[in-house]
Image (cartoon, rainbow, N blue to C red):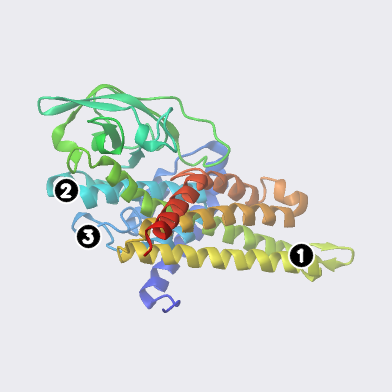
Amino acid sequence: MDFELSEEQRAFRDVARDFTAGEIAPHAADWDEHCSFPVEALRKAAALGFGGIILRDDVGGSALSRLDSAIIFEELAAGCASTAAYISIHNMACWMIDRFGDDAQRRAVLPKLTSMDHFASYCLTEPGSGSDAAALKTRAERDGDDYLLNGTKAFISGAGTSDVYVVMCRTGGEGPKGISTLIVPKDTPGLSFGKQERKLGWHSQPPAMVIFEDARVPVANRLGAEGDGFKIAMAGLDGGRINIAACSLGAARASLEAARDHMLVREQFGQALAEFQALQFRYADLASELEAARLMVWRAADALDREDPERTLHAAMAKRIATDAGFRICNEALQLHGGYGYLRDYPVERHLRDVRVHQILEGTNEIMRLIIARRLLAAERNAP
């Protein structure tokens, strides 16, 4: 095992870091304050290859690895976890089309998605099915060469702004085997959107309900065969969980760096905060947790790159560890700032608000524990 980044990885890490310093971090507070979706910045990120990081290069992708992707998302999230997380979701939806779509589907939609001339959304969650994703009710009924799509998706990042919606819907009976995946363009008649949700964090990306009322979608827009949709959705989430974990690392690292800078200059009782042993120990623990979480994320990304049979297990472990650690580190970094950490003049409170949802989305951390426990206990039961 070699824990050093390659020369190529260091190069694109530095590109992502410089881009974040110049194009994301200076504007993140304003995007947060005004709930602005930063289209211009997103397209600049895409110009660097971040609109299709792991996609094949024949449709404009960068053809990088899952580990490369995790390195990039950590850097982007150090400036704005909300914006980085949207890029992650966009990449996840695009990868599903690249991986499971036929050549006609890939060439029809991916070039404009990798350039971020168009944006993509992932549509799985519904008002009545969050963690119980296989219970989704949105239904697509066959009508000749089309499907008539009816139902509602909830908490969809990019809803109303995105141009392409990767939609999990029911084409068969109950349970996961009755689910299929459709590519639904924004201009589809019968597609509409709910009001923009008001949220604790993630203010730089617009979430809303996505509503289908007899939306007519060509059968040619289906990814894979009927009944493959749940498998496709879960494959997307393996990568999405690693990316959102990496976003938590970035926000946590930025918060910890801000806490360090504050501790070095802030004085109480005649000495800098950094000279108090109790605070030194707290900082040391946080730095160690961050490094441990990063190693878990990289391990999971490597497992996904190698198509390890246990890749879903490793992705769940990494997501649970890194998003819990990310929130805890941001919270402790805010505490180390004292009252200043609670002010919007400082970025730590924004990082805290943005990473809180990482423990919920892409599968709640309770569901991550369920995935882990079921796999490991099943392995024990089946052991000779």
Counting residues from the start of the chain, the first of labels 1 and 3 encountered is 3
In terms of secondary structure, where does tag 1 sit?
Answer: helix
Q: Which residue is mark 3?
A: 57
Residue 271 lies in what quarter of the image?
bottom right
Which of the pair 166/205 is nearer the observer? 166
Residue occupying image coordinates x 55% and y 46%: 354
Q: Is residue 145 left or right of residue 63?
A: left
**From where the camera sits, is residue 202 visible?**
yes
In terms of secondary structure, where does tag 2 sit?
Answer: helix
Q: Residues within 10 Å of mark 3 (few under 14, many from 20)?
A: some
Q: Residues within 10 Å of mark 2 (few under 14, many from 20)?
A: some
Q: Of the residues tagged 2 and 1, which is closer to the observer?
A: 1
Residue 46 lies in what quarter of the image?
bottom left
Which amino acid type corresponds to the residue marked 2 in the rendered image?
Arg
Position of residue 304 measured from the top left corner of the image (x, y, whole percent): 34, 61
Which of the pair 51/64 is nearer the observer? 64
Which of the pair 311/162 is nearer the observer? 311
Q: Which residue is mark 1?
A: 279
How many dots with numbers?
3
CA–CA distance in space, label 1 to label 3: 48 Å
In terms of secondary structure, where does tag 3 sit?
Answer: helix
Q: Are marks 1 and 3 in contact (CB under 8 Å)?
A: no
Which of the pair 56/379 is nearer the observer? 379
Residue occupying image coordinates x 32% and y 61%: 309
Counting residues from the start of the chain, the first of labels 2 and 1 encountered is 2
Q: Which residue is mark 2?
A: 107
Q: Is residue 192 left or right of residue 172?
A: right
Quadrant where the N terminus is found in the figure: bottom left
Q: Is residue 10 above or below residue 293?
A: below
Q: Are marks 3 and 2 in contact (CB under 8 Å)?
A: no
Which amino acid type corresponds to the residue marked 1 in the rendered image?
Leu
Q: Is residue 180 above or below residue 341?
A: above
